[in-house]
Amino acid sequence: MNEHLPVPQQPPALSAELLETIEAARRFEDLSRAANTRRAYRSDWSDFAAYCSRHSFPILPSSDRAVELYITYLAYARKPPLNPASIGRRLAAIAHYHRDAGYLSPTDMAVVKKAWAGIRKSLRIKPKPKKAVVSEELLRILPDAESTRAIDVRDRAVLLLGFSAALRRSEIVALHRADLAFEKKGVVVTIQYSKTNQEGEPERVAVEFLTSTTNCPVVALLRWLNLANISDGPAFRRIDRHGNIASEPLSPAAVAEIVKRAAERAGLDPRHVAAHSLRSGFVTTSRRRGLPDWAIQRHTRHKSPEMLNRYTHSQTLWDQNPSGDLGL
């Protein structure tokens, strides 16, 4: 296996252009991050950039193929090889610099995920399940409600609607303006196709107006549609680095990136969340608040009550602990 991997001998000196790129990327860092983490990320990013330079791979943005080869090299060809925890931190650093520079992270691409899963499996490392983003954490990660930047307005709408309607990322990106029917009590979201409903009747989910408009998903959705002047076509669209709104819809990977970027901004580890964290967060929050399973299941469109158990994540040992309600 190793004979097919790019194993560097004597690394050439970094070019002036590469050094400038690395230094520019450093300035994108979140200065609120702990000093030790910043130093580790700088070191990890410099190592990845040097690897890309040796093999003429693009650096920022990089490609999923480059990242796939890099982590395989770290696990099997590097002398000595890195342990999984160190490789995971390298992936986090690569994702961090791409997000802060305004790019989608190649670490979220299928090729990289499969390679990383294979490395963990070969080393018998079991991946941790993604964290459910419950309501109080959702409020922490939302972009500023007062921001008028298109990307902030869009991301607030994606996060709030994705959570409140318990949508999968594929369902979020497939929504069109015609699928959103605004009524007196809120918005009815029509889901034409879903993971469990490929050829059946369209499914509908109702999301109510909230008393407080600040974090109301319906208000956030209306604000985005008005700002982007969307009267037909995809409801959630790409935005380039200059703030221009495209006509093309978001990709499923972009939805995951929105969740990860928001989590990192709030001080959460972006490796522990994904787009699915919104859907599982809805189920967990609803059960915490004592809502009946039949109502949750109708909203999430799960086919069986047993599936709700897989989506419910206890945050601590005290979450719904039965020992406090034994009638003693």
Image (cartoon, helix red, strand yellow):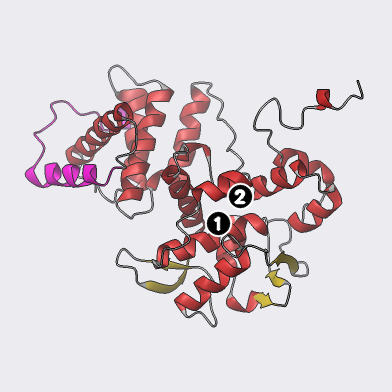
Spot occupied by residue 126 in the image (x, y as percentages of width and height): 56, 26
Q: Secondary structure at mark 2?
A: helix
Q: Is residue 71 magenta?
A: no
Q: Are marks 1 and 2 in contact (CB under 8 Å)?
A: yes
Q: Which residue, given by chain and number where applicable, does mark 2 sit on?
A: 278
Q: Which residues are magenta?
A: 1-29
Task: Kindly identify the amino acid type of the residue bearing the numbered disc 2.
Answer: Leu
Q: Secondary structure at mark 1?
A: helix
Q: Which residue, given by chain and number where applicable, does mark 1 sit on?
A: 159
Q: Residues within 10 Å of mark 1 (few under 14, many from 20)?
A: many
Task: Kindly identify the amino acid type of the residue bearing the numbered disc 1.
Answer: Leu
Q: Nearer the viewer, residue 250 or 57?
A: 250
Question: Would you say 98 lies left or right of 285 here?
Answer: left
Question: Would you say 292 lies left or right of 206 here?
Answer: right
Q: Is residue 15 magenta?
A: yes
The Cα atoms of the two marked residues, 1 and 2, are separated by 7 Å
Q: Residues within 10 Å of mark 2 (few under 14, many from 20)?
A: many
Spot occupied by residue 144 in the image (x, y as percentages of width and height): 45, 57
In the depicted structure, whether residue 76 falls above or below residue 91: above
Q: Residue at x 63, y 79 (%)?
A: 178
Spot occupied by residue 252 in the image (x, y as percentages of width and height): 52, 57
Q: Residue at x 20, y 29 (%)?
A: 8
Spot occupied by residue 223 in the image (x, y as percentages of width and height): 52, 72
Q: Nearer the viewer, residue 209 or 241?
A: 209
Residue found at the very far right of the displayed protein: 327
